[in-house]
Structures are given as C-alpha cells and as structure tokens.
Image (cartoon, helix red, strand yellow):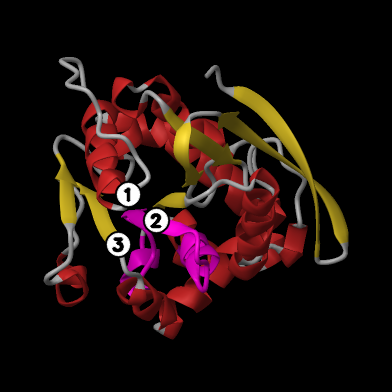
C-alpha cells in the first residue's frame, strides 16, 4: 500500500484539467483529504506516514490552481472545485467515502457530500462554516482587486508567511508559493460568498455523521451555537494547521472519528500515535 502520485484528466468550466493526487489503496472506504486555500495535497503528507491511518485507503487531491494541478484561473470557485473532486471520487469508485477536509476544503467537501449516498462520515478540520471563518486570510484576499492581488498581494503574503516565527505559517508559505495567484484570489472570493451565505452551516448540520476538529490554540468561540451538541475534538499544541503542529494527535482523532462512520476496521493499539 505504497502511496502513488496519480493524475486525473477532468473537464470543468470548458477546460481540460490535469488534477494531481496522492492515492494509497487500502481496506474498505476511501478517506478523501481536501486541503485549504493556498495549500495543497502536500499539507496531508503526514497522513500517509501516520501509524494510526495504516491500512486505510487515502486520496489527497491538489485542487485546481494548487500544488501541481492545472488552474481554472479566475473561474476557480468552491462549486467547481467540488465538481472536480466528485469526478475523481467517481473515477476511483470506492464503496464508501470519508471526507476529511481542512479550511476551504471544508466548504468544498460539504458541496461534494450533498446528496451522495456513499458518504460514511465527514470530518471538518477548521473548515469554513460561518462568516468569521474567513478572517484568517480569505476575506483579506477577496477584498483586494484581482490585479492588485496578482500583482503584489500574493507575493507579499508569501513573504510574510516565510518570515513568520510559526512553523505552520512557514509550511503554508511553501504550499502557497506553488499556487496560481489568480486561482487563489477567485477561490477566496467564492469562499467568502459561500461562508457569508449561511448554507455551509446548514449543510454541515444536515449530515448524518459529522464532526469538527480544531487546534487548541484556535479561537472557535464564534462557532459555539453551531457546534453545541456536536462531536468536537481539540488537538493539543496546535493552531489552524494541526497536521503540521501535532500530526500524531490529529490523525489519532481522525481515525477514531472515521471509525464511527463505519467501513473502517478499528485501529490496532499503536504506542507512537
């Protein structure tokens, strides 16, 4: 079950795309990993090395305009990303899927999940649900004109991340620098529109098996009304990027959560997390 770099040909918005992914075969349901804005499938590299996820089928996708996937440029929207992801899932044809989604990927994943009969569980890792979830970067990006962001805003943000004392932000800088600025700008605008619209929250709460994961350092007070009574896991010693700050604890939590959705064999006891 060695991970393999895989390319998928997908047509979206009248454009033929090459969408790259890392895929690992495994038992039962497929765990689909969807990354955040300005990130890429590389943000989930630790998942493929985690003892807790051993034996699980995994697929981490570079959304268009991120990582090494072809860009949709100014046509990059949450719903188009969802169409691309759905096409790849259909191509892989797993018996069931678990969607594990970070940040912007949470919004994409909610659109993917809508109406699917093969969804076993949905895990949101600080995925967008409400307007305040756009405060880290997407609202600031969306507030700039396309020309301003592509011309200077993109490079300026990458440089700020590179100079950050935070390890997770420096990792983000490396992923961000590989993205298409026009795609990031368009996707940010779409993400803000979806987050402000209120439907993401409704879609999340309508899912039969759902959970929310956050870094212990992240302020999620604004989500208290939404998450009341929901399955919520806090990852110690981490912020918005628990896959960087504390991957062992994150994947331990994710394994437990996807097991509740079925189609996943319970993990064997593992001393190293």
Q: Real-space Cα distance between discs 2 and 1?
A: 6 Å
* 181 lies above or below 7: below
Q: State the mark number for residue 210.
A: 3
Viewed as shown, does residue 34 lie left or right of 19?
left
**To which quarter of the image does residue 253 belong?**
top left
Q: Nearer the viewer, mark 1 or mark 3?
A: 1
Q: Nearer the viewer, residue 200 or 261?
A: 261
Q: Counting other residues with Cα less than 10 Å from the Cα at mark 2, is it few (<14), some (14-19), or many (20 or more)?
A: many
Q: Bin the neighbour count of mark 3 within 10 Å (Cα to Cα): few under 14, some 14-19, many 20 and up.
A: many
Q: Is any part of residue 165 visible from this angle?
A: no
Where does residue 252 sit, x and y in percent of width and height? Answer: 23, 33
Of helix, strand and loop, which one carries label 1? loop
Residue picked out by circle 2: 120
Q: What kind of element bears circle 3?
A: strand
Closer to us: 254 or 102: 254
Dot placed on the residue nearer the N-terminal end, 2 or 1: 2
* Residue 29 percent location from the top left of the image: 46, 43
Residue stretch rendered in magenta on the structure: 107-135
The correct choice, above or below, for 165 with respect to 65 in the image is: above
Q: Residue at x 31, y 46 (%)?
A: 258
Residue 62 falls inside the magenta stretch:
no
The residue indicated by pointer 1 is 262
Answer left or right for 143 relative to 92. Answer: left
**Residue under the image location 64 percent in, 67 percent down:** 77
User: Mark 2 touching mark 1, by CB under 8 A?
Assistant: yes
> On residue 45, which mark appears?
none
Picture quadrant of residue 82: bottom right
Return the disc, 2 or 3, that comes first in the chain's sequence: 2
Q: Is residue 28 visible?
A: yes
Q: Secondary structure at mark 2?
A: strand
């Amino acid at each position: 079950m060695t991970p393999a770099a895989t390319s998928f040909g997908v047509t979206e918005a009248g454009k033929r795309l090459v969408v790259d992914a890392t895929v690992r075969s495994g038992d039962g349901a497929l765990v689909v990993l969807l990354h955040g804005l300005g990130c890429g499938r590389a943000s989930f590299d630790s998942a493929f090395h985690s003892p807790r996820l051993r034996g699980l089928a995994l697929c981490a996708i570079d959304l268009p305009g991120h990582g090494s996937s072809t860009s949709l440029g100014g046509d990059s929207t949450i719903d188009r990303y969802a169409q691309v992801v759905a096409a790849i899932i259909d191509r892989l044809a797993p018996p069931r899927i678990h969607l594990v989604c970070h940040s912007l990927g949470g919004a994409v994943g909610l659109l993917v999940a809508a109406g699917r009969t093969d969804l076993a569980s949905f895990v949101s890792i600080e995925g967008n649900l409400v307007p305040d979830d756009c405060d880290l970067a997407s609202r600031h990006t969306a507030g700039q004109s396309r020309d301003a962001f592509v011309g200077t805003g993109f490079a300026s943000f990458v440089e700020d991340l590179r100079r950050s004392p935070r390890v997770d932000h420096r990792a983000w800088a490396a992923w961000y620098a590989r993205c298409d600025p026009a795609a990031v700008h368009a996707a940010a605008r779409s993400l803000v529109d979806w987050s402000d619209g209120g439907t993401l929250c409704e879609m999340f709460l309508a899912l039969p098996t759902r959970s929310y994961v956050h870094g212990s350092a992240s302020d999620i007070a604004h989500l208290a009304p939404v998450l009341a009574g929901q399955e919520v896991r806090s990852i110690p010693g981490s912020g918005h990027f628990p896959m960087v700050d504390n991957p062992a604890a994150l994947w331990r939590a994710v394994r437990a959560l996807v097991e509740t959705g079925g189609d996943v064999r319970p993990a064997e006891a593992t001393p190293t997390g």
